[in-house]
Amino acid sequence: MRFNRVYDFQRALCEDPKLIEEWFGLVSNMRAKYGIVDSDFYNFDETGFMMGVICPGMVVTSIERCGRSKAIQPGNREWATAIICGNGEGWTIPLFLMVQGQYHLSNWYTESGFPADWALKPTSNGWTNNETGLEWLKHFDKHTIRQRKGKYRMLVLDGHESHESISFQSYCKSNDIICLRLPPHSSHLTQPLDVGCFGVLKRSYSCQIEGFIKAHINHITKVEFFIAFKAAYLQSFTIQNMKAGFRGAGLIPFDPQSILSKLDIRIRTSTPPSTSLELTNSWISQTPHNPTEALLQSTLVKARMARHQSSSPTPIFETVQALAKGTERLAYEVTLLSAENRILRRANEALSKRRRAKKNSTT
Protein backbone atom coordinates (compact mmCIF):
# COMPACT_ATOMS: atom_id res chain seq x y z
CA MET A 1 0.00 0.00 0.00
CA ARG A 2 1.27 3.48 -0.85
CA PHE A 3 0.12 6.93 0.17
CA ASN A 4 -0.70 9.42 -2.58
CA ARG A 5 1.62 12.41 -2.61
CA VAL A 6 -0.26 15.70 -2.88
CA TYR A 7 1.29 17.63 -5.75
CA ASP A 8 0.70 21.21 -6.87
CA PHE A 9 -1.20 21.21 -10.16
CA GLN A 10 0.73 24.14 -11.65
CA ARG A 11 4.04 22.47 -10.83
CA ALA A 12 2.82 19.23 -12.37
CA LEU A 13 1.77 21.07 -15.52
CA CYS A 14 5.27 22.47 -15.88
CA GLU A 15 6.89 19.07 -15.46
CA ASP A 16 5.63 18.09 -18.88
CA PRO A 17 8.73 16.65 -20.63
CA LYS A 18 7.92 18.64 -23.75
CA LEU A 19 8.15 21.95 -21.84
CA ILE A 20 11.41 20.95 -20.19
CA GLU A 21 12.84 19.81 -23.55
CA GLU A 22 11.93 23.20 -25.01
CA TRP A 23 13.74 24.90 -22.11
CA PHE A 24 16.94 22.99 -22.77
CA GLY A 25 16.60 23.67 -26.48
CA LEU A 26 16.33 27.39 -25.75
CA VAL A 27 19.41 27.32 -23.50
CA SER A 28 21.47 25.49 -26.11
CA ASN A 29 20.41 27.76 -28.96
CA MET A 30 20.91 31.02 -27.05
CA ARG A 31 24.33 30.02 -25.71
CA ALA A 32 25.44 29.12 -29.23
CA LYS A 33 23.95 32.28 -30.74
CA TYR A 34 25.67 34.67 -28.30
CA GLY A 35 28.83 32.65 -27.66
CA ILE A 36 28.20 32.26 -23.91
CA VAL A 37 31.01 30.46 -22.08
CA ASP A 38 30.53 28.89 -18.64
CA SER A 39 32.04 31.85 -16.79
CA ASP A 40 29.55 34.23 -18.45
CA PHE A 41 26.55 32.01 -17.69
CA TYR A 42 24.86 33.20 -14.46
CA ASN A 43 21.86 32.27 -12.38
CA PHE A 44 20.36 34.63 -9.82
CA ASP A 45 17.37 34.53 -7.52
CA GLU A 46 15.99 35.90 -4.27
CA THR A 47 15.55 33.92 -1.08
CA GLY A 48 13.86 35.18 2.08
CA PHE A 49 14.49 34.71 5.80
CA MET A 50 12.53 35.39 8.96
CA MET A 51 15.37 36.43 11.21
CA GLY A 52 14.43 34.42 14.30
CA VAL A 53 12.76 31.41 12.72
CA ILE A 54 14.54 28.08 12.32
CA CYS A 55 13.72 25.17 10.02
CA PRO A 56 12.15 21.99 11.42
CA GLY A 57 14.44 18.96 11.45
CA MET A 58 14.77 15.36 12.55
CA VAL A 59 16.15 14.61 16.01
CA VAL A 60 17.15 11.46 17.89
CA THR A 61 15.08 10.86 21.04
CA SER A 62 14.53 8.12 23.58
CA ILE A 63 12.15 5.35 22.60
CA GLU A 64 10.18 6.06 25.77
CA ARG A 65 9.52 9.65 24.78
CA CYS A 66 5.92 10.44 23.83
CA GLY A 67 4.74 13.19 21.55
CA ARG A 68 6.73 15.38 19.21
CA SER A 69 10.04 16.99 20.10
CA LYS A 70 10.09 20.77 20.29
CA ALA A 71 12.84 23.27 19.62
CA ILE A 72 12.86 26.80 21.01
CA GLN A 73 13.31 29.61 18.51
CA PRO A 74 13.65 33.37 19.10
CA GLY A 75 10.53 34.02 17.06
CA ASN A 76 11.62 37.35 15.53
CA ARG A 77 9.67 37.35 12.26
CA GLU A 78 11.27 40.41 10.73
CA TRP A 79 11.91 39.69 7.08
CA ALA A 80 15.16 39.85 5.09
CA THR A 81 15.78 39.01 1.43
CA ALA A 82 19.08 37.98 -0.12
CA ILE A 83 19.67 38.25 -3.87
CA ILE A 84 22.33 35.70 -4.77
CA CYS A 85 24.05 35.13 -8.10
CA GLY A 86 26.69 32.69 -9.30
CA ASN A 87 28.11 31.42 -12.58
CA GLY A 88 28.85 28.07 -14.15
CA GLU A 89 32.42 28.02 -12.88
CA GLY A 90 31.25 28.29 -9.25
CA TRP A 91 32.03 31.97 -8.63
CA THR A 92 29.41 34.07 -6.81
CA ILE A 93 29.21 37.84 -7.01
CA PRO A 94 29.12 39.85 -3.76
CA LEU A 95 25.77 39.52 -1.98
CA PHE A 96 22.90 41.99 -2.20
CA LEU A 97 20.86 41.94 1.03
CA MET A 98 17.61 43.74 1.92
CA VAL A 99 16.38 44.19 5.49
CA GLN A 100 13.38 45.93 6.99
CA GLY A 101 14.24 49.48 8.05
CA GLN A 102 14.62 53.10 6.97
CA TYR A 103 18.26 53.93 7.64
CA HIS A 104 21.68 52.29 7.75
CA LEU A 105 22.96 51.92 11.31
CA SER A 106 26.69 51.98 12.01
CA ASN A 107 26.62 48.96 14.36
CA TRP A 108 25.34 46.78 11.51
CA TYR A 109 28.81 47.08 10.01
CA THR A 110 31.05 47.55 13.05
CA GLU A 111 29.64 44.70 15.18
CA SER A 112 28.78 42.03 12.61
CA GLY A 113 31.82 41.88 10.36
CA PHE A 114 29.62 42.67 7.37
CA PRO A 115 31.80 42.25 4.23
CA ALA A 116 32.72 45.56 2.61
CA ASP A 117 31.80 44.42 -0.91
CA TRP A 118 28.31 43.21 0.07
CA ALA A 119 25.43 45.59 -0.68
CA LEU A 120 22.90 46.27 2.09
CA LYS A 121 19.62 48.06 1.45
CA PRO A 122 16.95 48.91 4.04
CA THR A 123 13.40 48.73 2.68
CA SER A 124 9.97 49.18 4.23
CA ASN A 125 9.31 45.43 4.46
CA GLY A 126 12.56 43.65 3.58
CA TRP A 127 11.16 42.50 0.24
CA THR A 128 12.35 43.16 -3.29
CA ASN A 129 10.50 45.32 -5.81
CA ASN A 130 11.11 46.85 -9.24
CA GLU A 131 13.39 49.54 -7.81
CA THR A 132 15.60 47.14 -5.89
CA GLY A 133 15.58 44.73 -8.84
CA LEU A 134 17.17 47.41 -11.02
CA GLU A 135 19.63 48.34 -8.25
CA TRP A 136 20.70 44.71 -8.05
CA LEU A 137 21.13 44.55 -11.84
CA LYS A 138 23.53 47.50 -11.69
CA HIS A 139 25.31 45.75 -8.81
CA PHE A 140 25.61 42.64 -11.02
CA ASP A 141 26.91 44.67 -13.96
CA LYS A 142 29.52 46.40 -11.78
CA HIS A 143 30.94 43.13 -10.46
CA THR A 144 30.87 41.09 -13.69
CA ILE A 145 31.72 43.54 -16.45
CA ARG A 146 35.47 43.05 -16.03
CA GLN A 147 35.11 39.30 -15.49
CA ARG A 148 33.39 38.52 -18.75
CA LYS A 149 35.21 36.49 -21.39
CA GLY A 150 32.91 37.25 -24.30
CA LYS A 151 30.77 40.21 -25.31
CA TYR A 152 27.60 38.95 -23.65
CA ARG A 153 26.61 37.71 -20.20
CA MET A 154 23.61 35.45 -19.77
CA LEU A 155 21.28 35.54 -16.76
CA VAL A 156 18.95 32.64 -15.93
CA LEU A 157 16.08 34.03 -13.86
CA ASP A 158 12.50 33.33 -12.82
CA GLY A 159 9.36 35.28 -13.69
CA HIS A 160 9.32 37.61 -10.65
CA GLU A 161 7.70 40.96 -11.38
CA SER A 162 10.92 42.87 -10.69
CA HIS A 163 12.69 40.92 -13.48
CA GLU A 164 9.99 41.81 -15.99
CA SER A 165 9.98 45.59 -15.54
CA ILE A 166 10.73 47.84 -18.51
CA SER A 167 13.68 49.45 -16.70
CA PHE A 168 15.21 46.03 -15.91
CA GLN A 169 14.85 44.77 -19.47
CA SER A 170 16.11 48.06 -20.98
CA TYR A 171 19.22 48.01 -18.81
CA CYS A 172 19.95 44.42 -19.86
CA LYS A 173 19.58 45.28 -23.53
CA SER A 174 21.84 48.33 -23.23
CA ASN A 175 24.57 46.40 -21.43
CA ASP A 176 24.69 43.14 -23.42
CA ILE A 177 23.01 41.03 -20.74
CA ILE A 178 20.86 38.22 -22.15
CA CYS A 179 17.99 37.06 -19.92
CA LEU A 180 16.60 33.53 -20.03
CA ARG A 181 13.38 33.04 -18.11
CA LEU A 182 12.90 29.66 -16.44
CA PRO A 183 9.72 27.70 -17.17
CA PRO A 184 7.14 28.62 -14.49
CA HIS A 185 7.03 26.41 -11.37
CA SER A 186 10.09 24.45 -12.50
CA SER A 187 12.89 26.00 -10.43
CA HIS A 188 13.16 22.89 -8.22
CA LEU A 189 14.41 21.11 -11.35
CA THR A 190 15.92 23.74 -13.61
CA GLN A 191 17.38 26.50 -11.42
CA PRO A 192 20.95 25.88 -10.19
CA LEU A 193 20.51 27.93 -7.00
CA ASP A 194 17.44 25.94 -5.98
CA VAL A 195 18.99 22.62 -6.90
CA GLY A 196 22.37 23.05 -5.26
CA CYS A 197 22.52 25.89 -2.76
CA PHE A 198 19.37 27.37 -1.21
CA GLY A 199 18.43 24.29 0.80
CA VAL A 200 21.95 24.09 2.23
CA LEU A 201 21.85 27.81 3.08
CA LYS A 202 18.54 27.52 4.96
CA ARG A 203 19.73 24.57 7.02
CA SER A 204 23.04 26.22 7.79
CA TYR A 205 21.31 29.43 8.88
CA SER A 206 19.03 27.43 11.20
CA CYS A 207 22.11 25.86 12.81
CA GLN A 208 23.60 29.31 13.39
CA ILE A 209 20.42 30.55 15.09
CA GLU A 210 20.30 27.40 17.22
CA GLY A 211 23.81 28.28 18.35
CA PHE A 212 22.58 31.67 19.56
CA ILE A 213 19.72 29.97 21.43
CA LYS A 214 22.17 27.67 23.21
CA ALA A 215 24.10 30.78 24.22
CA HIS A 216 20.83 32.16 25.73
CA ILE A 217 20.43 34.86 23.08
CA ASN A 218 16.66 34.80 22.77
CA HIS A 219 16.09 37.79 20.51
CA ILE A 220 17.73 38.06 17.10
CA THR A 221 18.54 41.64 16.17
CA LYS A 222 19.89 42.62 12.77
CA VAL A 223 23.45 42.37 14.12
CA GLU A 224 22.93 38.74 15.17
CA PHE A 225 21.18 38.08 11.86
CA PHE A 226 24.13 39.44 9.88
CA ILE A 227 26.57 37.34 11.91
CA ALA A 228 24.51 34.17 11.47
CA PHE A 229 23.73 34.80 7.82
CA LYS A 230 27.35 35.57 6.90
CA ALA A 231 28.55 32.32 8.50
CA ALA A 232 25.77 30.30 6.81
CA TYR A 233 26.43 31.91 3.43
CA LEU A 234 30.16 31.24 3.51
CA GLN A 235 29.53 27.60 4.47
CA SER A 236 26.90 27.10 1.74
CA PHE A 237 28.07 29.04 -1.29
CA THR A 238 31.26 27.21 -2.11
CA ILE A 239 32.60 26.69 -5.60
CA GLN A 240 31.71 23.00 -5.31
CA ASN A 241 28.08 23.68 -4.32
CA MET A 242 27.58 26.26 -7.05
CA LYS A 243 28.97 23.91 -9.69
CA ALA A 244 26.81 21.12 -8.28
CA GLY A 245 23.76 23.34 -8.77
CA PHE A 246 24.52 23.87 -12.47
CA ARG A 247 25.28 20.18 -12.85
CA GLY A 248 22.11 19.15 -11.01
CA ALA A 249 20.01 21.43 -13.25
CA GLY A 250 21.48 19.74 -16.33
CA LEU A 251 23.11 22.96 -17.57
CA ILE A 252 26.88 22.48 -17.06
CA PRO A 253 27.80 20.01 -18.37
CA PHE A 254 24.81 20.21 -20.68
CA ASP A 255 22.74 17.12 -19.90
CA PRO A 256 18.99 17.50 -20.50
CA GLN A 257 18.42 13.78 -20.05
CA SER A 258 19.47 13.95 -16.40
CA ILE A 259 16.35 16.10 -15.78
CA LEU A 260 13.99 14.53 -18.30
CA SER A 261 14.62 11.10 -16.77
CA LYS A 262 13.18 12.35 -13.46
CA LEU A 263 9.85 13.39 -14.94
CA ASP A 264 6.99 10.97 -14.39
CA ILE A 265 4.14 13.49 -14.33
CA ARG A 266 1.60 13.53 -17.15
CA ILE A 267 -1.53 15.66 -16.95
CA ARG A 268 -4.28 13.26 -17.88
CA THR A 269 -7.56 11.90 -16.67
CA SER A 270 -7.65 8.91 -14.38
CA THR A 271 -6.68 5.66 -16.08
CA PRO A 272 -9.68 3.33 -16.36
CA PRO A 273 -9.44 -0.09 -14.70
CA SER A 274 -7.26 -2.50 -16.65
CA THR A 275 -9.15 -4.89 -18.88
CA SER A 276 -8.77 -8.62 -18.31
CA LEU A 277 -7.65 -11.04 -21.03
CA GLU A 278 -11.12 -12.64 -20.97
CA LEU A 279 -12.76 -9.31 -21.76
CA THR A 280 -10.35 -8.74 -24.65
CA ASN A 281 -11.08 -12.15 -26.14
CA SER A 282 -14.86 -11.90 -25.75
CA TRP A 283 -15.17 -8.42 -27.31
CA ILE A 284 -17.30 -8.26 -30.47
CA SER A 285 -17.18 -5.38 -32.91
CA GLN A 286 -19.44 -2.50 -31.93
CA THR A 287 -19.44 1.23 -31.42
CA PRO A 288 -17.27 2.01 -28.33
CA HIS A 289 -18.89 4.05 -25.57
CA ASN A 290 -15.93 4.58 -23.23
CA PRO A 291 -12.11 4.61 -23.40
CA THR A 292 -11.77 0.90 -22.56
CA GLU A 293 -14.18 -0.14 -25.32
CA ALA A 294 -12.38 2.14 -27.79
CA LEU A 295 -9.10 0.32 -27.12
CA LEU A 296 -10.79 -3.09 -27.38
CA GLN A 297 -12.32 -2.12 -30.71
CA SER A 298 -8.94 -0.99 -32.02
CA THR A 299 -7.29 -4.24 -30.86
CA LEU A 300 -9.96 -6.32 -32.58
CA VAL A 301 -9.68 -4.46 -35.89
CA LYS A 302 -5.89 -4.79 -35.92
CA ALA A 303 -6.09 -8.51 -35.12
CA ARG A 304 -8.46 -9.09 -38.05
CA MET A 305 -6.28 -7.09 -40.44
CA ALA A 306 -3.19 -9.03 -39.35
CA ARG A 307 -4.84 -12.15 -40.71
CA HIS A 308 -5.21 -10.49 -44.11
CA GLN A 309 -2.42 -11.90 -46.31
CA SER A 310 -2.92 -10.28 -49.71
CA SER A 311 -1.30 -6.94 -48.89
CA SER A 312 0.67 -5.21 -46.18
CA PRO A 313 -1.65 -4.00 -43.43
CA THR A 314 0.82 -1.42 -42.03
CA PRO A 315 -0.86 1.71 -43.49
CA ILE A 316 -4.22 0.51 -42.24
CA PHE A 317 -2.74 -0.15 -38.79
CA GLU A 318 -1.54 3.45 -38.58
CA THR A 319 -4.89 4.82 -39.70
CA VAL A 320 -6.83 2.76 -37.20
CA GLN A 321 -4.39 3.67 -34.41
CA ALA A 322 -4.91 7.37 -35.09
CA LEU A 323 -8.66 6.84 -35.13
CA ALA A 324 -8.50 4.92 -31.85
CA LYS A 325 -6.49 7.69 -30.16
CA GLY A 326 -9.01 10.28 -31.27
CA THR A 327 -11.89 8.14 -30.12
CA GLU A 328 -10.21 7.54 -26.77
CA ARG A 329 -9.65 11.25 -26.23
CA LEU A 330 -13.26 12.09 -27.07
CA ALA A 331 -14.50 9.31 -24.82
CA TYR A 332 -12.47 10.68 -21.92
CA GLU A 333 -13.94 14.14 -22.50
CA VAL A 334 -17.46 12.72 -22.50
CA THR A 335 -16.72 10.79 -19.29
CA LEU A 336 -15.45 13.95 -17.59
CA LEU A 337 -18.40 16.02 -18.76
CA SER A 338 -20.85 13.37 -17.57
CA ALA A 339 -19.21 13.29 -14.14
CA GLU A 340 -19.27 17.06 -13.95
CA ASN A 341 -22.94 17.13 -14.91
CA ARG A 342 -23.78 14.61 -12.19
CA ILE A 343 -22.02 16.73 -9.59
CA LEU A 344 -23.79 19.88 -10.77
CA ARG A 345 -27.18 18.14 -10.75
CA ARG A 346 -26.65 16.89 -7.19
CA ALA A 347 -25.58 20.37 -6.08
CA ASN A 348 -28.57 21.92 -7.80
CA GLU A 349 -30.95 19.42 -6.19
CA ALA A 350 -29.47 20.12 -2.75
CA LEU A 351 -29.83 23.86 -3.32
CA SER A 352 -33.45 23.44 -4.43
CA LYS A 353 -34.24 21.40 -1.29
CA ARG A 354 -32.76 24.11 0.94
CA ARG A 355 -34.77 26.80 -0.85
CA ARG A 356 -37.99 24.80 -0.53
CA ALA A 357 -37.31 24.13 3.15
CA LYS A 358 -36.64 27.81 3.76
CA LYS A 359 -39.81 28.80 1.89
CA ASN A 360 -41.92 26.33 3.88
CA SER A 361 -40.49 27.53 7.18
CA THR A 362 -41.37 31.16 6.38
CA THR A 363 -44.94 30.29 5.42
Image (cartoon, rainbow, N blue to C red):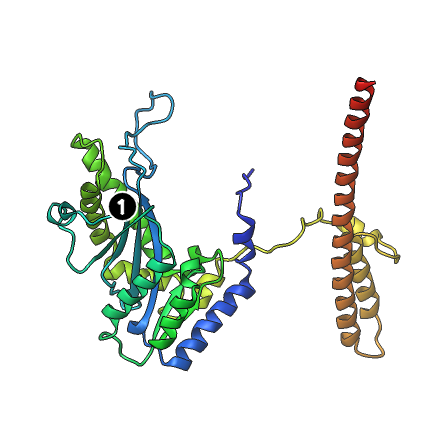
Q: Is residue 268 left or right of residue 82?
A: right
Residue 183 lies left or right of residue 69; in this view the side is right
Q: Is residue 326 visible?
A: yes
In the image, taking residue 305 as reference, residue 196 lies left or right, namely left
Nearer to us in this view, 12 or 97: 97
Left or right, 14 with respect to 253, comes to right
From the image, which quarter does the C terminus lie in?
top right
> Which one is in front, 178 or 102?
102
Query: Where's residue 228, x and y in %?
Result: 20, 44
The quarter of the picture where residue 354 lies is top right
At a point 76% along the width and 40% down the height, the residue shown is: 344
Q: Say which residue appears at 55% left-offset and 60% top-offset.
A: 16
Q: Secondary structure at mark 1?
A: loop
Q: Looking at the picture, which amino acid does disc 1 mark?
A: Gly
- The residue under label 1 is 101
Quadrant in the rendering for residue 171? bottom left
x then y, percent, for residue 318:
75, 72
* Quarter placement of the N terminus: top right
